[in-house]
């Protein structure tokens, strides 16, 4: 019986110590205003969601995200000047592309 209590105590102590080292996850940055027109968008709907293709024709890199109605928003990512992003699939309907 003593071994069992010692084991439970050791496991509880380890969990407490590890829990105190945990760092809370940072919240995703809130979407800003709509991305400028130099971020070209091409949205294609399917019966299960939509594909969005993005191209940066701005004079600088832009950090953007896709905002979705009826589904989770896409993550913020940086699209370099002159680059395109591979088509992304989302469930829901396209709302807008926003700056982060």
Image (cartoon, helix red, strand yellow):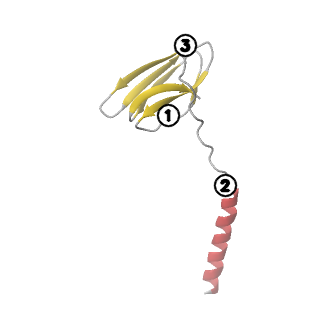
What is the C-alpha distance between the residues marked 3 and 1? 20 Å
Give coordinates of residue 25: x percent, y percent.
62, 47
Tag of residue 57? 3
Say which label, 3 or 2, has the lower sequence index.
2
Tag of residue 74? 1
Frontmost residue, 48 versus 87: 48
Mark 3 neighbour density, 10 Å: few (under 14) some (14–19) many (20 or more): some
Give coordinates of residue 81: x percent, y percent.
59, 16
What is the C-alpha distance between the residues marked 2 and 1? 26 Å
Disc 1, SS: loop
Q: Which residue is mark 2?
A: 22
Disc 2, SS: loop
Looking at the image, do the residues carrying marks 3 and 1 touch, with CB atoms under 8 Å apart? no
Give the farthest residue toward the left.
47
Residue drawn at (54%, 14%) of the image? 38
Residue drawn at (36%, 23%) of the image? 44
Residue drawn at (44%, 22%) of the image? 53
Mark 1 neighbour density, 10 Å: few (under 14) some (14–19) many (20 or more): some
Say which label, 2 or 1, has the lower sequence index.
2
Q: Is residue 17 above or below residue 84?
A: below
Frontmost residue, 88 versus 58: 58
Q: Answer left or right for 64 relative to 42.
A: right
């Amino acid at each position: 019986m003593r071994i069992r209590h010692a084991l439970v105590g050791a496991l509880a102590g380890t969990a407490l110590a590890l829990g105190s080292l945990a760092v809370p996850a940072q919240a995703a940055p809130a979407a800003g205003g709509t991305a400028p027109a130099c971020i070209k968008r091409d949205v294609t709907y399917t019966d299960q969601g939509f594909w969005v293709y993005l191209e940066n024709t701005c004079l600088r890199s832009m950090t953007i995200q896709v905002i979705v109605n009826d589904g989770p928003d896409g993550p913020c990512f940086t699209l370099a000047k002159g680059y395109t992003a591979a088509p992304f699939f989302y469930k829901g309907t396209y709302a807008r592309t926003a700056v982060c």
